[in-house]
Image: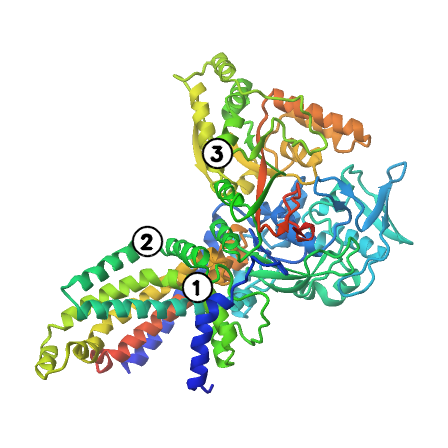
Amino acid sequence: MPILRILLLRLLTTIVTLAGVAVIVFVVIRIVPGNPIAMMLPPGATEEDIARLTALYGLDKSIPEQFAIWVAGVLQGDFGTSITTRQPVLDLVLGRLPATLELSIMALVMAMILGGAAALTGTRFRGGRTEGAIDVANGMALSVPDFLWGLILILLFGVLMPVFHISGRVTPSLDLPFATNFYLFESLIRLRFDLWADIVAHMFMPALALAIPLAAIIGQLLKQSLKETMNLDYVTLARTKGYGETRVILREALRNAALPTLTLVGVQFTFLIGGTVIIERLFSYEGLGNMAIDAVINRDLPLIQGIVLLFAAIFTAVNLIVDLLYAVLNPRLRHA
Amino acid sequence: MNLNRRSLLKLSAATAAAGTLGLPTLAQGIEELVIAYNVNLPSWDPTVGPSAVNPTIQGLYQSVFDQYILQQPDLSPAPGLLTEWGWSDDKKQVWMTVRDGVTWHDGSPFTAEDVAWSLARAANPETGNPINFVWGTLANHRVEGNRVIADVAQFDPTIFKWMYFLTGYVLPKAYYEKVGAEGFEAAPIGTGPYMVDSFERNAFVRLKANANYWGGKPEFETVTIKFVPDAAARVAEVESGNSHVTLEMPYEEYDRLKGGPLAGVAAPISDIGMIFLNDIEVMTDPNVRKAAAHAIDKQAIIDRLLSGYGVKIDTLQTPEYDAFDASITVAYDEAKAIELLAASGYGPDNPVKFKIQTTRGFKPKDYEMVQAIVGLWRRVGIEAEIEVYEIAKHFELRAADQLAPAAFYNWGNSVGDPTTSTGFAMFGPSPHSVWDGEDLINMIGPLWGEADEAKRIEGWKAVDRYVAENALVIPLLQYVQPILHAPGVVVTPHASGALLPHLMKRA
């Protein structure tokens, strides 16, 4: 029951949050300087031309009127039409969402593997040079922002040792038999490992750039939790039973120590999705973030609204999933 | 899904091989030309919406679509889909002869109907063509054999120049009417040198050579244009061999790479850097304006900030433009600037103060240039405060005539006509001008409809001289576009700044 209650409460707050985001983004992007009509004014345009274009894009109406029209459309699944691409906003953002989700999930998996390995190794060899080296590496990973990691990776694995692709999501000359835009998952399902390898070769560097700072955070927190857990009575009991240190860490301490890390991973995952904006641009990856930058540059108001609303929906959904997972994994909450 | 040991082994092998097998080997003969382009292509219709007036995208459009009139790399017009064109003696009509034997990418014949329909569509305000006000000067488009005739609703001496400028593209009437706007966006066809093979928005477009192109089949059978907006990633693309050609990188990077494994070409293009002066506050004082103009050492800025890649200009015309007049000069003269300011009661101890706005990173070293200019101004007694803004804000402020007293901007005019440089930048009623002086409006006004071409060009030169003598704007430099390419490719630069794959050959 507590989980159901949490779920219902969170769904309610999600709706309120999304409504708030919709209002804020709609108003803010119309208040900040730079309107799309000014962006497309050709030399020699007259006041009449400006008025004609303004009316053509529905910007001649008051902000409340525009908002009412937009909300009415959204409630019917119509998020408007992009000014620059002249395509339905919903089609555009849903078309790009899989690319960003795949990149984020791959980055998250990488971060968990790297961070987890660092934490376990640091705990296993705590107090020694290995832990010190891991701490230094963690510090370095945290002090460099993801886009700078991206540039370093491009230089290392794109130019000096050209192992991975620098830009794009897939090699343009390949024929893609996919029915969805989840290229990575669908290539696996179809057992098209040639395509899978090509997609991974494109995603590897942007995903790693996103993963490195998160891996450092996971590594630090998990190691700290593990070290605290290693001093608890039940762990000492396990040792007295003659279990080896590695087994004690993996079988006894890890499960309890992982709970705070799980919460953090959930929160950080939303930041990681936010980080895709810059990383996707750097690697010319065809995701939502790359599209968002173009939308902002071109003041494509309907597209900005659609992207922000979708990002907000993802953030709240991820937070909801994390809360539920935490409730499921934490016995104190589960049996409350 | 049935995952077994064999498939897992294949998976591992494929992953390990990804790096080596998945990447192009570009040192060998180039079969598929790969270009790392600096902007994304939002829309395929070159006549509608913001993309249609974005100069940086025109090279992509011109690979697929033909303009009414061909523009050569030196900006001069040449027969294209129209082989001949002109005015009736009384200037009440225009006529255009349409090229025979041209086909659309779907194999259907290109006809005069397509030209008449494209012109009428562009003139229709409901289609959303941003240049509608130009195309609307022609009306009653009709076909007579292989000729298109239109009535002149309002005389515009530059109408044929617009036919190789923004939105001046011919689209397929029958195909467009059959598939509609959405269908055309999904599968665009033109008469251009390349056909669209596949397109992933924000990622790439893959083009196939048009074997029936009226100008001859392009050298490269397949061209992939990757959209790589980040300059560092573009440089890495060509440096690693992932792409053969790229453009618009920092000049330092260009210098580093052009003499090494890559070749390079850097030629002046039709974009200029300039400082708008708004006739508000202290800018109404001619001494302040003239001092600001004389205090800028443009050549030093080009040499030190742009590694020498730039051409100093003193009017809004570059040497390629029709109304360029080399005799109009504004000398760098610090002493004269000090003298002018002193006449208005200003000096290093009592500086004149105003704000200058600039973008940062929109054009090469834009902010750094303004910093240098502010430093030069300080030496003569001008204290300028720099405000950084986005380009979108610049457009909005300029359209509302609310720019600061000084505002750095770049102006593109690939058509090379004085109306689309000095004209629209300096004519008060234009939303692109922030100088509202009646004297200038009166000088420019009669030139819009001047039918005598020689007289028209001389008139614009006189306007430029007046603008320079009174420092109503501060032209700075003509930009140079750096292009890096693999040694196996010969790139012909186009003065409009468009990077055109059909002008590229094998070395």
Q: Which residue is mark 1?
A: A311
The answer to whether B293 is drawn above or below residue B498 in the figure is above
* Relative to B386, A120 lies left or right: left
The answer to whether B338 is drawn above or below residue A229 in the figure is above
* Relative to B303, B322 lies left or right: right
Picture colour scheme: rainbow
Both marks 1 and 3 on one chain:
no
Contact check, label 1 and label 3, Cβ < 8 Å: no
Q: Amino acid at mark 3?
A: Leu
Labelled disc at residue B449: none
Q: Which residue is mark 3?
A: B305
Q: Amino acid at mark 1?
A: Phe
* Relative to B32, B359 lies left or right: left
Q: Residues within 10 Å of mark 3 (few under 14, many from 20)?
A: some
Chain under numbered label 3: B
Labelled disc at residue A144: 2
Q: Is residue A20 visible?
A: no
Q: Amino acid at mark 2?
A: Val
Cα separation between marks 2 and 3 = 29 Å
Q: Secondary structure at mark 3?
A: helix
Cα separation between marks 1 and 2 = 25 Å
Q: Nearer the viewer's eye, disc 1 or disc 2?
A: 2
Chain under numbered label 1: A
Contact check, label 2 and label 3, Cβ < 8 Å: no
Residue toward you, B491 or B389: B491
Residue B310: percent from the left, percent from the top? 57, 34
Residue A262: percent from the left, percent from the top? 28, 71
